[in-house]
Image (tube, coloured by chain):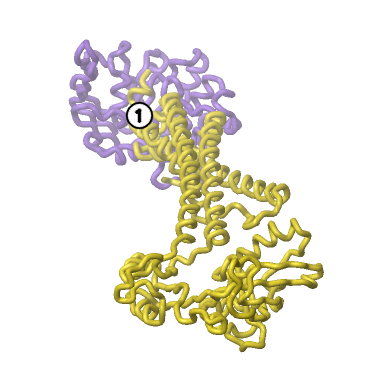
Chain colours: A purple, B yellow
Amino acid sequence: MIDAKGVCRVFDDGERGRLTVLDGATLQVADGEFVAVVGRSGSGKSTLLHVLGGLDTGYRGEVTVAGVRLDGLSDAALSRFRNETVGFVFQSFHLVSGVSALENVMLPARFAASPPADLEARARAALERVGLPSHAARSPGQLSGGERQRVAIARALFASPRLLLCDEPTGNLDAATADDIVALFKQLNASGLTIVAVTHEDRLRAAASRVLTLSGGRLS
Amino acid sequence: MSASVWPLVRLSLSRDRRSALSSTFGLAVGVASLVFFVSLGLGVGRVVREKVFPVDSSLVEVVPASFSLGLLGGGKLDDTAVARLEALPGVSRVFKKMNVRAPAVTIYRGDFFGRPLHMGLEVLAVGVEPDFVKRDVLMGEFVDPGPDKPIPALASTRLLEIYNKSFAPQRSLPQLSGQMLTGFVFPIDFNRSFVTATPPSASSIPAQAQLVGVSDRALLAGVTIPLDVARRLNRTANLDDVTFTAVTVQTADPSAVPLVVEAVKAMGLSVDDQERRMAENAGAAVAISTSSLALLSVLICVLAAFNIAHAFSAAVRAREKELGVMRAVGATRAALFRLVLAEALLLGLVGGLVGTLVALAAGLALDATATSLLPPFPFKPESWFLRPPWLLAGGVGLGVLAAAGGAFFPARRAAATDPARVLAG
């Protein structure tokens, strides 16, 4: 599923000069794996996730995801890759406010090259899959933290991606809700979905089939 | 842009209604004032052009020079000069005119459309060729009927307007139309005057005139009769029946007028362009007023565009994470640019439509007010406004254009959103 070789990412850190976050990171993930990436704050976990998801293009190295070589792709091709192949789940949910849960789940279809005709039915199915079949009309403000994260996961699952990239997905949730979300990830992984999650949380680390540590810009 | 993005546009605008309303209101004010003032200017211009100074731009009024050395016969408008005018390049026809050079009066005592009328007037009369006015002749032939029959005569359309709106109301006389006047017969004594210091040498020539219509081309303060009648009357009064008072030259195309005018002056003749100049001056005054107000309206639209730029810049900053999420789920940079621009275009469309409708409503209200409150006066129009389709489309288009202009840079900023930066942490 993922084959990343020698990924380097350097940021311009203003007066302090250049900050090397990834320094030759290499990663292989097989189809259907559940990989947790751990590391201290600022170690570059989110940056690694953004590189793998085609959100960050300012790196050096070779990144192939689901058979697609990402480095050098045009904006249109990368956008299509994000739309069809990967789903993102963020720590802060990042739902669109003032819009219903259903509309949030359908968001990827708004930018799809050929949106499905049954997009509302698909969105309802995605909400059902994350255990929120009756929350379609609610806006993010009317949902609890756990419910928001479930809506965000439903949005990530809407286009039936092959890879789910999760950035501290339980970081803003209480323990009980975090357990529910981790259980959901395990369930999704059991159904064949490849998951890469960066986290500080032990429960997520425990749920993963493999745990990698990011330190000094390299994975081990 | 994919049609499925429109729900996002609608949702985004409905989420920030106050800002959307403020932007739309500014555009609507600018568009409304532009459409209102331009339609008013066009309407007033039409009245000036068609009613107050109805000038045919393809006609040139040639008159003898007021000062001539007489070399080569220059300055005299006789048959020879007319033949030379006819031969000028760009000239399609010429129409000869001759004043009745004897004075004339009309003394009317009798029934005037149901009211008793006692009136004595000095009358000017000019003879014109039948073809010059044939489109306005409603009765009989516009030719010399012979000495003992009523002379066909045309009255001025503008004179009739002045009579109806000023003269008749003050004297409790009836309102008249061209059709009502057609057939009206009144006495006219040529070679007679109420005011001349020296009595005419010959005795008066009594005649009757019968109105056969009204015409824009008729003499304003007098009657217009067939050229042959004017010649006959001048001959009878032992006055010049050879030299024409004026010749109206019709050009094949209005663009030929300057060349014809130049050639006419080279022949030692003059061009009477007083009417044209008055029409041009009046038209220019209307155009300048309209342009000033239209410019002010465009400035309002520019301010509205700045307001949109400010509002959209703030909105794009506030929606940074939302735009980042859109990038994460597959939006291209171009899609985000179009999304923000579409939001502005929708506001511009609504602002333009509302502004145009408000301008139309204000114009209709002003027309109704003017009709009911203003007293009748000459050339008072039924509507002060002219609303061509291009103006209405232009009003809506200006709203859209101003909105698009205002949102352009915020849309570029939205397109440049770096999802990795805004979604981190």
Q: Is residue B343 visible?
A: no
Q: Residue at x 66, y 88 (%)?
A: B148
Q: Residue at x 49, y 13 (%)?
A: A175
Q: Is residue A120 above or below residue B108?
A: above
Nearer to the camera, A26 or B305: B305
Q: Is residue B101 above or below residue B344?
A: below
- Where residue B73 sits, quadrant-wise, is bottom left
Q: Quadrant of the N terminus of chain B?
A: top left
Q: Residues within 10 Å of mark 1 (few under 14, many from 20)?
A: many
Nearer to the camera, B410 or A25: B410
- Where residue B424 sits: x, y (%)? 36, 20
Looking at the rendered structure, the kind of residue marked 1 is Thr
Q: Quadrant of the C terminus of chain B?
A: top left
Nearer to the camera, B47 or A162: B47
Q: Is residue B85 above or below residue B395?
A: below
Q: Residue at x 64, y 68 (%)?
A: B122
Q: Is residue B410 above or below residue B230?
A: above
- Where residue A203 sits: x, y (%)? 42, 15
- Where residue A52 sits: x, y (%)? 29, 29
Q: Residue at x 21, y 17 (%)?
A: A20
Nearer to the camera, B268 or B213: B268
Host chain of mark 1: B
Q: Is residue B113 visible?
A: yes
- Where residue B31 sits: x, y (%)? 52, 42
Residue named by callout 1 = B417
| Residue B32 falls left or right of residue B121 | left
Q: Secondary structure at mark 1?
A: loop
- Where residue A102 sits, quadrant-wise, is top right
